[in-house]
Image: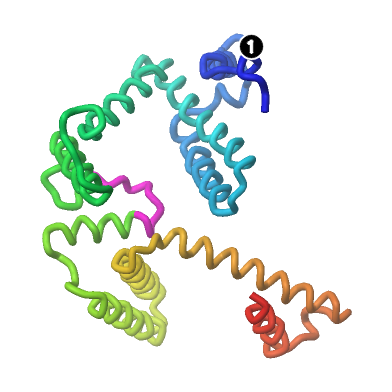
Amino acid sequence: MINQEDKYTIEKLLEIMAALRQPDGGCPWDLEQNFATIAPYTIEEAYEVADAIERGSLNELCEELGDLLLQVVYHARMAEEAAAFDFADVVDGICAKMIRRHPHVFGQDTVADSREQTESWEVLKRRERAVKPGADRVLGGLPVGLPGLTRAVKLTRRAARVGFDWPGLSGVRAKVGEELGELDDAIAEDDGEARAAEMGDVLLALANLCRHLDLDPESCVRQANLRFERRFARVEDGVRQSGRDWEDFELDELDRFWVAAKREE
């Protein structure tokens, strides 16, 4: 690791960002960007942080966290140029929020365990949301830009707080079956619009099932993607080692490679 005295600081990063956005001598690409064009990169960098964590790569995590930090600095710089707020305001806001939401650490309150802390956190969040537009609605205030499955979990969790939920797992699982049946009907009717709607209902029901199982649907599907990639690579190895082309294989032959890959795991 670099000696502490040789390391760049957050102040240097802010200087670099300001130079990139300098109309006279800055980077042409950076000067063309705005909040909307940078937002997709912000989301992408957050996913790359999650990916490094999933793979247990701390070296990559360090780099990806830097890329994510750059996104915060980028947005803050553009806001400063618009005279809206600056990076110091961002830091001040999050510090104030953390102190406010942890009265058991920075105040006189006490909590018995992490569960009680989570409940306290949600109470404080609801108080803060109460002054925002749409706060009088049970499902109000949830960002539409969240990943679909993540937002589905948050929506159903909000609804559950007011009693709109199944009392047990069996009802949620039955709902998944019901939605799959409706998807089958839409497929049989060859109705593209209905198929899309019913598939959405299936995914929403599955996200809700994940919530009842204390599972993160995004993490589940990421792990499934990794398993698929790993197993398909073994199928590809089998095809290559055979000396034959893909089109020379029947599906059942390829499936045998797949089954063998699953057994090896």
Point out the image quarter for the C terminus.
Answer: bottom right
From the viewer's perspective, is 200 left or right of 34? left
The residue sitting at 25% across, 57% down in the picture is 155
- Relative image position of residue 261 (x, y in whole percent): 68, 78
Please say if 209 is above or below 2. Answer: below
Magenta-drawn segment: 141-150
Please say if 258 is above or below 197. Answer: below
Confirm whether the magenta stretch covers residue 85.
Answer: no
Please say if 51 is above or below 107. Answer: below
Chief secondary structure of the magenta span? loop
Q: How many marks?
A: 1
- Relative image position of residue 65 (x, y in whole percent): 54, 36
The residue sitting at 21% across, 40% down in the picture is 125
Q: Is residue 200 visible?
A: no
Front-most of 53 and 187?
53
From the viewer's perspective, is 132 left or right of 149? left
Front-most of 89 and 35?
89
- Relative image position of residue 38 (x, y in whole percent): 50, 34
Please say if 211 is above or below 109. Answer: below
- Residue assigned mark 1: 25
Front-most of 139 and 126?
126
